[in-house]
Amino acid sequence: METARPPASASALAAFFVVLAALTALGFAAISWLPVVASEHGPGVDRTIVYILVVTGVLFLVGHAVLAGFVWRYSRGGTPEYRPLSPKVEWSWALLPVLALTVASEVGVLVIGGPAWSQIYGETPAGALEIEVVGKQFEWLVRYPGKDGRFGRTAAELVHDVRNPVGLDKKDPAASDDVVLRGALHLPEGRPVVVRLRSLDVLHSFAIPELRVKQDIVPGHLGRTQFRPVRAGSYELACAELCGLGHYRMSGKVVVEPAPEFERWLREQAGWFE
Amino acid sequence: MIESSGHEGGHEAPRGFLRRYVFSTDHKVIGIQYFLTAVVMALVATVLAMLIRVQLAWPEKAVVAPETYVSLVTMHGTLMVFFVVSLALVSGFGNFLIPLHVGARDMAYPFLNMLSFWVIVPGCVLMLASFLVEGGAAAAGWTAYPPLSALGKAVPGSGLGQTLWLLAMALFIASFTMGGLNYVTTIVNCRTRGMSMMRLPLVVWTFLISAVLGLLSFPALTAAAILLLLDRHAGTSFYLPAGLVFGNETLPHQGGTPLLFQHLFWFLGHPEVYVLVLPALGIGFEVIAAFARRPPFGYRLSVYSILVIAVLSMIVWGHHMFVSGMNPYLGKYFSIVTVLITVPFSVLGLNLIASLWRGRIRLDAAMLFALGLVSAIGIGGLGGLYLGTATSDLYFHDSYFVVGHFHFTIGTVTFFGIYAGTYYWFPKMFGRRMDEGLGRVHFWLTVTSLFPMFLLMHYQGLGGLLRRTYDPTVYAYNAAARGLNLSITLLAFGLGAGQIVFLVNLFRSMFAGERTGENPWQATTLEWTTESPAPHGNWRREVPSAHRSPYEYGRNGGAEDFVLQSAEKA
Ligand code: HEM
Ligand SMILES: [Cu+2]
Ligand SMILES: [Cu+2]
């Protein structure tokens, strides 16, 4: 029986799907909530996100439009027929989504996302500044190699909250000028930075949203991440991996300043044992 | 193919309340027992969710303590995944439906089946009891990553609470394994005459693949849990490296790595998503076919897609570890194969949508939820692209984007499958219908709160809000994103209230629902050829044979527009 109008429930459901799709697409405006980008590879990460927003946005809108249309159209009655498809028809139907999605998703991984991934995990650029970040419940410790440019030896047995937070070994000559700071990281603008990552206790994750940096710190492993800050300013360092009851307050500060100012600041820092 | 010609089936209906309803070996009773157990656990898990939301909406009031918050999040996630969705959807519906669908009088191993249920009961008790012990319930996240989960010093919940968590999970795995063995054996060996594999209802295919995936992947979690117990209580160092320092004291462990646990956990954890989601899709296919009066579009394609998903799901676990420090080439591999899963998934989604084409849709509550499920697959599946693409996951990892994403997949798709299945098979379970009016109210209250709520969480993720954070106001950069927290909490209350309508409907209809006959929905599969509720042994007469495809809808036009799968060819 074909009736002229679908029942109210069908119109309501179709309307719901349309409104949902529209609101979802509108919500993509939240892209403006992405924190400002302050690293060289950051725009590559953002480009990947925007690419996926566009692809999924289109698929989502089209899918929901068809879903809403079918619900509305085929709630009016009618006499369906039993007509199974031949395998050939089925396969040719499948071809379009299979091709479209394979291409759309792999382009995102390889073409759009690939370059930024290689920047983060590729060769260390020449002239990089090497620093160390140590995570512990619920604090960030930062170590600079000092004037000799070498990190001194550390040992877990030497760690003391107050007197020696990263466990520097006094007997190692390279250790005496190492600079150790709590909760704050200074970086030069425009120079590549390599961060050695260590944890004293549990998993932490070194995350600086503005720099599009996130790297887990696994106890027992010497971790590593690299990036080039390109925009001076003060940013927040967050712990992104659950590390206990104080996880939420394990924050720190990242100060990116022009290279000369950074150099001056670094010269003013005394070594931990000086 | 056993028992296909037995007259009274092998066994007599047992007498006595205990044998019939408590220690029953009847797959239907066991299915309902699982379902009701899941309802109880869902109540607890939902209350925990509400407490989480209260804390997030008013962090300045510090409604709960930080260590309690971490326990709440951990236990909410654990209960929902393993003790609610797994129990209701896989153990509950799987038990109830499989023998009825394949034409068997019971599961292949009825005693094992009863045992599987009675193993999960102490598991539930242990999980709940862990709230009461010193230090509180487990607090290392539902992922239980060591060292947090391995060392009592690391977090208060890592004391007895974490031990109980591990023991309860062991019972869960034991139960799930017994269930899975039963499913595979029953589906492969106990099909009735004529029920070839390609004549199985799609939902049975999803239960089969779900069980196979479970059997292949849960042993990894079992191993992971045993090693963790040893690290905790026997002084071993599987996950614990040298040089861990707590309170100026160096621990004696050496030689292990926390990464081992992560690999083992996600080797299970990722397939587990499909263990849960596939049966929900299967239910979607059954319900949509019956209410659109059309065979599901592309039966073969759907079966092949399910198989492809199963294979891919076993080789992508590393996408949970992109930022764990893995080799970047390995990361790239995991990224490439992960996003490929979108392909078979969208084929399934499109098949569900195309099943409506030229149908005659009736929007009963079961159908409403099945269509909601289709929409949720869209959101969940497409959301996966953001996380499967390693470069963007770098930003989204451990943010509320992830929280929004998995609530659509293992939260919404599965719950909508459970709801659609409940409205649809309730008559076969209890011989009565659920109230349609209340069912619609339930649907509308649910979709109007749930969809915006979990969508907003995605946007919070774009704004950088991190998950498992007790008080997000510690950071300034996430101000826009956390501004949504109050709205989300209000939506969560609305969602919770909507589920009360379902519970009222469920329990009222058990005793006072309108009585129904054999086949209230005029559906085609074998369960509708026996009376409602189905008797012990499932059919009083001979077990029906399968003579045709399970979905011959729209056969003759007119009122009788369907042909039962058991109808002989003219
Ligand atoms: C009643 C509706 C629900 C609400 C309001 C809700 C809310 C939340 C919130 C806010 C979190 C994140 C907490 C945090 O990271 O700090 C969370 C975590 C989680 N939820 Fe839900 N949820 C609901 C239902 C579900 C369902 C149905 C599932 C089914 C699988 C589920 C599974 C999880 C899991 C696995 C986690 C992660 C736990 C962890 O981080 O260890 N939730 N939920
Ligand atoms: Cu931390
Ligand atoms: Cu996964």
Image (tube, helix red, strand yellow):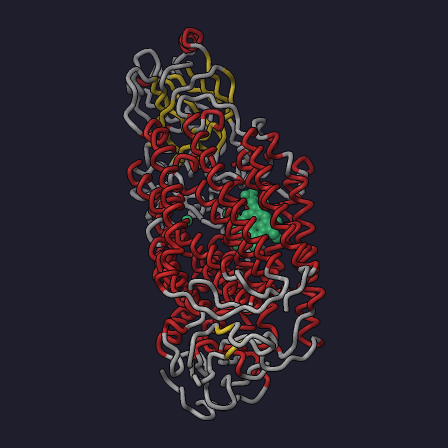
Q: Quadrant of the N terminus of chain A?
A: bottom right
Q: Which is nearer the eye, B283 or B153?
A: B283
Q: Residue at x 59, y 66 (%)?
A: B360
Among the 4 quarters of the image, the one containing residue B523: bottom right
Q: Residue at x 62, y 82 (%)?
A: B517
Residue A265, image x and y in percent?
44, 9
How many numbered circles are shown? 0
Residue B558 vertical position relative to residue B140 in the rendered view, above or below: below
Q: Residue furthest bottom?
A: B7
Q: Residue at x 51, y 52 (%)?
A: B377
Residue B414, image x and y in percent?
53, 58
Q: Is residue B546 left or right of residue B423?
A: left
Q: Which is nearer the eye, B235 or A104?
A: A104
Q: Quadrant of the C terminus of chain A?
A: top left
Residue B22 vertical position relative to residue A149 in the rendered view, above or below: below
Q: Which is nearer the eye, B62 or B161?
A: B62
Among the 4 quarters of the image, the one containing residue B204: bottom left
Q: Is residue B511 among the parts visible in the rendering?
A: yes
Q: Is residue A155 left or right of residue B249?
A: left
Q: Which is nearer the eye, B79 or B434?
A: B434
Residue B501, image x and y in percent?
70, 62
Residue B101, image x and y in percent?
47, 76
Q: Is residue B76 among the parts visible in the rendering?
A: no
Q: Is residue B130 left or right of residue B109?
A: right
Residue B498 vertical position relative to residue B90 in the rendered view, above or below: above
Residue B17 vertical position relative to residue A144 in the rendered view, above or below: below
